[in-house]
Amino acid sequence: MSGAEPVPSPGAGAPTGRPTRRPQPRTGASAVASLSLNLAPMIDMTFLLLIFFVLTTSFHPPEGILGAKLTEAGPVPGRVALPISPIIVRVRTTGPAVADFAIQIDNFAAQPASFAELAQFLRDIRRNEGFDEETPVVIVAPADTTWEHVVECWNAAVRAACRNISFGGEG
Amino acid sequence: MAAKGKIRGSSLGFNMTPMIDIVFLLIIFFVLVSNYSSAERVPVELPNPYKSQARKVKVTDRVIVNCQWSASGPDGQPGVVYRAGPNPPEPLERISDRLAAARAAAAAEGRELIAVIRADRRLPFEDVRAVMRMITENQIEQMRLVAQAGEEP
């Protein structure tokens, strides 16, 4: 056999001692570009959200609810029959300042000087026989008493765990 | 030359990461502290009782009566202004009509209407008592008072 052996083509046959190089595809540059993240829309939305919250946020003190149940309206609206032996708390405003008020409790010697003392009185009175959480507490205030002082009385009664609180009016 | 160009290109880049971090922190802050007030809650200086027992409670089937203190009331004098929810200031008689209509609608559906009074702390009791009287006349038995909320126990 003296047939001629096929001549390997350059770079495709036996090792020549030098690594062969394949031509790189030209699409490499565009592949890298497609991986980049376009942040512009996200930043737009983020700034819009930020502006929205900055403009709409208002820092009000939180408000809550004090429960109350009105007695059922009778034939004469606005007048209700008082239950037996209620605790009648009278409050009146005595001056322009918040601390200008006076509290008086009908038929009891103790006269609280503050709303904290009123709450304590309403708690302590339940140690006596005939008084419990259901004992009616009627808050009576003259017409010119500020609403703040009336609500303070109401809050003190709620703090004392009184469940039957109502309003009365003088005159 | 190529290496030089690459350095120049990267030095022109703007690192927005810290800015986006700050912006996101601000957004999270505002989302957490935002208190979406309804239109019914018109600005009123609420009473802030000592150790307030007022709690954030969701009241459905409610009608809110706002009693605002105004430096120029209906007659130009400082005094009370009544508003039924987000409505403009109205006389108490008109609000009573609204209450009656709301109560009738609630009763037709078997629901009990709750009247919520948001009154300014500076008002005299007689102005708020007039609202209570109106509520009673409309045979609404449930009433709630609004004050500044205290801390939960």
Image (cartoon, rainbow, N blue to C red):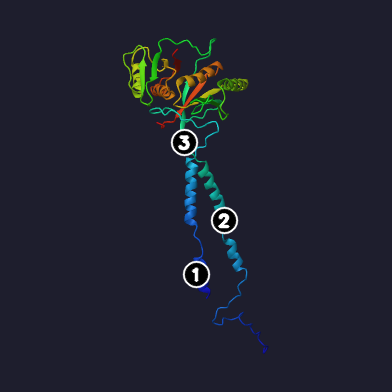
The residue tagged 3 is A60
The residue tagged 2 is A40
Please tell me the numbered disc located at residue B7. 1
Residue at 49% in and 43% down: B30
- Tag 3 secondary structure: loop
- Tag 2 secondary structure: helix
Residue at 52% in and 47% down: A50
Please tell me the numbered disc located at residue B53. none
Between the residue at mark 2 and the residue at mark 1, the CA separation in whole angstroms equals 24 Å
How many neighbours does mark 2 have within 10 angstroms: few (below 14), some (14-19), or many (20 or more)? few
Q: Quadrant of residue B150?
A: top left
**Residue A130's spot in the image, x, y percent?**
37, 12
How many neighbours does mark 3 have within 10 angstroms: few (below 14), some (14-19), or many (20 or more)? few
A157 in relation to A38, above or below: above
Do badges 2 and 1 share one subunit?
A: no
B113 in relation to A49, above or below: above
Q: Amino acid at mark 1?
A: Ile
